[in-house]
């Protein structure tokens, strides 16, 4: 039986076709890759795909609905669309603490504007004034304010003082923001993590313009730091259950702090990540998709679930730090 691997994508140009070509170049019997094609979506009807790599559903709700329907009908969707829908950065930080991965001190903030269809009575459980002083004392300034469920470096603010925070917070309207301690780092890494445990560490400079953030021929890094980064990458992705993710770490005093680790459609464009990193992600994503297709069981749920979810079902305890 032919097992098809599909890739669902939007505006990106270099990775999807390179991924399709690499899978097909391998010439593996009964495995074929192509761009996903959708002409109708009926509930509980399976797709033609054993595996779908999702690169776009975070921006297109119709695609997310299509992928959940595909998943419940057996397609191995990468990444798990049910978990992706439930996940967000503030929760990830809490989970990281529970599995023993260092993260910056973080608080969640009420929205600047009232959500639609609410009034003052909707907030009767919230104390006024909110305990801003203790938050500021814990976090310190400067700090970072970012959406609790955002991505792609959108709506990220560096704030210098309480007055600066309130001024910028007013611009965020209905976004739920989190306030996060600044980590003054000596090294910074962005890591691809595939299949929850295949790690590719890239030196990264988030303060550079976007196309210059991936550092080529950077200074050598201590093996102990790289080993810790690798260990924390696996620990986080095993707990989260992501098959295709990037994790970012800022290193302060030899300790890698996980800064951003919910990127289930991470940048894989040759023009930003560079040729060597692009070659790695194309090759390893192709191998992972082929492996998932070979493991595919018709009529079964073929999704990856993290230990955070699986342990609730089996009654195991997720190991705490």
Image: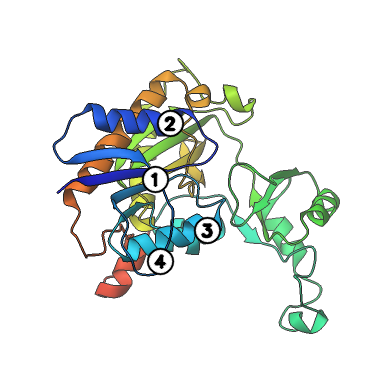
The residue labelled by disc 4 is: 42
User: Is residue 147 positioned above or below 152 on the image?
Assistant: below
Q: CA distance from mark 2 to mark 3?
A: 22 Å
| Dots 2, 1 in contact, CB < 8 A | no
Q: CA distance from mark 2 to mark 4?
A: 29 Å
| Dots 1, 4 in contact, CB < 8 A | no
Q: How many marks?
A: 4
Query: Can you tell which mark lies on residue 15?
Result: 2
- Give the residue at x 26% y 64%: 301
- Give the residue at x 55% y 58%: 61
Q: Is residue 83 visible?
A: no
User: Is residue 62 positioned above or below 37 on the image?
Assistant: below
Q: Earlier in the sequence, mark 4 or mark 3?
A: 4
User: Is residue 236 positioned above or below 206 on the image?
Assistant: below
Disc 2 crowd, CA 10 A, few/some/many (<14, 14-19, 20+):
some
The residue labelled by disc 3 is: 62
The kind of secondary structure element at disc 2 is: helix
Q: Earlier in the sequence, mark 3 or mark 1?
A: 1
- Give the residue at x 30% y 64%: 73
Q: Earlier in the sequence, mark 2 or mark 1?
A: 2
Q: Earlier in the sequence, mark 1 or mark 4?
A: 1
The percent position of residue 36, horizontal first and vertical second, equals 39, 45
The percent position of residue 178, horizontal first and vertical second, equals 65, 57
In the image, farthest residue toward the top: 217
Q: Is residue 136 visible?
A: yes
Closest to the observer, 284 or 93: 284
Disc 3 crowd, CA 10 A, few/some/many (<14, 14-19, 20+):
few
Closest to the observer, 105 or 176: 176
Q: CA distance from mark 3 to mark 1?
A: 14 Å
Q: Earlier in the sequence, mark 2 or mark 4?
A: 2
């Amino acid at each position: 039986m032919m097992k098809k691997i599909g890739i669902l994508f939007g505006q990106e140009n270099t990775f999807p076709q390179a991924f399709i070509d690499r899978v097909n170049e391998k010439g593996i019997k009964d495995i074929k890759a192509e761009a996903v094609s959708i002409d109708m979506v009926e509930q509980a009807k399976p797709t033609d795909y054993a595996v779908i790599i999702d690169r776009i559903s975070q921006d297109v709700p119709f695609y997310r609905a299509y992928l959940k329907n595909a998943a419940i009908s057996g397609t191995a969707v990468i990444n798990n669309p049910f978990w992706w829908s439930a996940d967000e950065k503030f929760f990830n930080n809490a989970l990281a603490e529970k599995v023993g991965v260092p993260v910056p001190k973080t608080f969640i903030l009420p929205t600047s504007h009232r959500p639609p269809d609410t009034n003052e009575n909707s907030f009767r459980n919230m104390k006024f004034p909110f305990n801003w002083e203790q938050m500021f004392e814990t976090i310190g300034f400067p700090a970072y304010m970012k959406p609790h469920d955002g991505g792609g470096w959108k709506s990220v603010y560096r704030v210098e003082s309480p007055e600066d925070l309130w001024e910028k917070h007013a611009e965020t309207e209905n976004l739920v923001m989190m306030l996060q301690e600044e980590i003054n780092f000596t090294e910074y890494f962005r890591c691809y993590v595939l299949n929850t445990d295949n790690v590719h560490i890239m030196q990264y400079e988030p303060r550079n313009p976007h196309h210059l953030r991936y550092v080529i021929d950077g200074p050598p890094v201590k093996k102990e730091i790289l080993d810790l980064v690798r260990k924390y990458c696996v620990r986080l992705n095993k707990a989260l259950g992501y098959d295709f993710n990037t994790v970012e770490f800022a290193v302060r005093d030899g300790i890698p702090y996980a800064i951003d680790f919910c990127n289930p459609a991470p940048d894989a464009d040759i023009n930003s990540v560079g040729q060597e990193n692009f070659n790695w992600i194309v090759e390893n994503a192709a191998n992972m998709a082929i492996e998932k297709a070979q493991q595919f069981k018709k009529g079964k749920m073929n999704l990856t679930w993290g230990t955070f979810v699986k342990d609730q079902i089996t009654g195991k305890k997720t190991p705490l730090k």
